[in-house]
Image: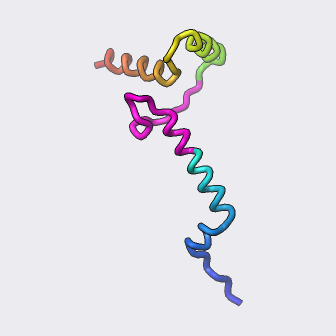
Amino acid sequence: MAKKKASLADYNASPLAALGTARKERNTEAQAATGSAETPARDTKQISAHIPKTLYRDVKRELAEVEDLTLTDLLTQLLGDWVKARK
């Protein structure tokens, strides 16, 4: 007996598809949370970088003392200033 080829409807009805949908919803919520009032999440790009652990700890400690400044805001400001200085 020939095996039935799975259709998109079969995939969407599977329990695994529900997990994928939930994961996509969580990712969308996380991406929306990364945007600020001035820069919506759709206009941003998530990046990663390797920095010394001690530097990261120091930055987190300093940011905790500054009201309304996030790591994203700090990096955006520093990188923007660096680009302007190079022009």
Point out residue 32 in the picture as x, y percentages from the top left corner: 49, 39
Camera-nearest residue between 9 and 87: 9
Position of residue 48 in the picture relative to residue 80 (left or right): right
> Where is residue 85, by image quadrant?
top left
Residue range in magenta is 27-50
In the rendered image, residue 47 lying in the magenta stretch gets the answer yes
39 over 82 or under it: above or below: below
User: In the image, what residue occupies the spot 67% across and 61% down?
Assistant: 16
Q: Residue furthest bottom?
A: 1
User: In the image, what residue occupies the spot 45% across and 36% down?
Assistant: 45
In the rendered image, residue 43 lying in the magenta stretch gets the answer yes
Q: Quadrant of the N terminus?
A: bottom right
User: In the image, what residue occupies the spot 56% across and 14% down?
Assistant: 63
Point out residue 69 in the picture as x, y percentages from the top left corner: 49, 17
Camera-nearest residue between 5 and 87: 5
User: In the image, what residue occupies the spot 61% across and 50% down?
Assistant: 23
In this picture the colour scheme is rainbow
Q: Residue furthest right?
A: 1
Q: Quadrant of the C terminus?
A: top left
Total tally of numbered discs in the picture = 0
Q: Residue furthest left?
A: 87
> Where is residue 54, by image quadrant?
top right
